[in-house]
Amino acid sequence: MKVEVLQKEAIQLLKELIETPSFSSEEDETAALIENWFTQHDIPFQRTKNNVWAVSQNYDPEKPTLLLNSHHDTVKPNAGYTNDPFRAIEDNGKLYGLGSNDAGGCLVSLLATFTYFYQKENLRYNLVIVASAEEESSGPNGLNSMLSIIPKIDVAIVGEPTQMQLAVAEKGLVVFDAVVKGTPSHAAHPNNDNAIYNTIEVLDWFKKYRFKKSSDVLGDVKMTVTQISAGNQHNVVPASVNLVVDVRVNDAYSNQEIATILQNESPCTEITPRSLRLNSSSISIDHALVQAGISLGRETYGSPTLSDQAALSCESLKLGPGDSTRSHTANEFIYIDEIKEGIELYINILEKVIV
């Protein structure tokens, strides 16, 4: 198919996706829209829960496989919206609507790209595309659940808004639940072991602590206390204070190493990771995908935000139209020209690598 036709169809699909609510684990109707895309282009597909996927027509198990992936779930709209988040509004070159930028523009661009290459013969790589669910919630029925179902993946492009620059690494995430304990008492009596006062020193430790190893691409590990809770009566000193600590992990550490360090060194009474599975991701600067992007004028950088890359054990490149700073904001939008450029660049990069 001509690129211009695919661009037009992709933009129309994005409008339909915007106008179809698809919160994480509630993506049934957008999955049906993606099924319609494959049906209209005579591409056999499969659906596993709300993940819709397909493989290139001339799939050869002897060749390496390249995954194209983006997600069709969204967060819930925030209170700052002045537009209807479920209405696709095209105005002055912008397409407004929930999920337009994160990551609808990426998804429809990758669907168009996959369709462009679907029937081509003698490619160096097989292509597999997964339009995945539950990315925003890191849920159990997203891309992570598909890796034992789809063909083995050797490398991946994960569609997230990067302004079509090359995110060659991505920070991992570990969320910790921490407890600072003290001695409960009546507020009227002296207490030199007040859990809330004990927390002051603990918070200062988290504020000042620095992990030793930095990364050339991702910089330092970033640790932030994001929640604190304690007590339920004005006249009772609580026995403990609960903290939530968000740690964005660079590629110099595994998530397990971060957990071990904090459990050994932090002044908390208890500190427990919720999950260790969302590790950092990267791809070699020398990989053909990266070099193809560089040859087309794209720049490399390290991404601080989490994506479905965390579910993959192979090398992966985060790349897509749109701007990450617009994600999860009120009146979210993507430029129409960003989608057109995204499709062209995806195709041009892949032509340098797989054709």
Image (tube, helix red, strand yellow):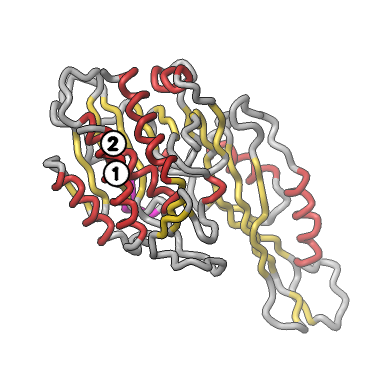
The secondary structure that most of the magenta stretch takes on is loop
Placement of 8 over or under 73, stated as above or below:
above
Residue lying farthest to the right in this orientation = 190
Number of other residues with Cα within 10 Å of mark 1, as a class: few under 14, some 14 to 19, many 20 or more: some
Image-based side of 23 in relation to 259, left or right? left
The magenta segment: 139-143
The residue type indicated by label 1 comes to Lys
Number of other residues with Cα within 10 Å of mark 2, as a class: few under 14, some 14 to 19, many 20 or more: few
Write the residue at 31% across / 26% down. Answer: 154
- Give the CA distance from mark 2 to mark 1: 6 Å
Q: Which residue is under mark 2?
A: 4
Write the residue at 40% across / 35% down. Answer: 342
Q: Which residue is under mark 1?
A: 8
- Secondary element type, mark 1: helix
Residue 191: mark in rendering: none
Relative image position of residue 115 (x, y in whole percent): 22, 36
Write the residue at 43% across / 59% down. Answer: 98
The residue type indicated by label 2 comes to Glu
Say whether residue 311 is visible.
no
Q: Are marks 2 and 1 in contact (CB under 8 Å)?
A: yes
Where on the picture, by quarter, is residue 269?
A: bottom right
Foreground: 341 or 57?
Answer: 341
Foreground: 24 or 255?
Answer: 24
Relative image position of residue 160 (x, y in whole percent): 44, 42
Image-based side of 224 in relation to 304, left or right? right
- Secondary element type, mark 2: helix
Say whether residue 315 is visible.
yes
Placement of 190 over or under 323, stated as above or below:
below
Write the residue at 53% across / 68% down. Answer: 82
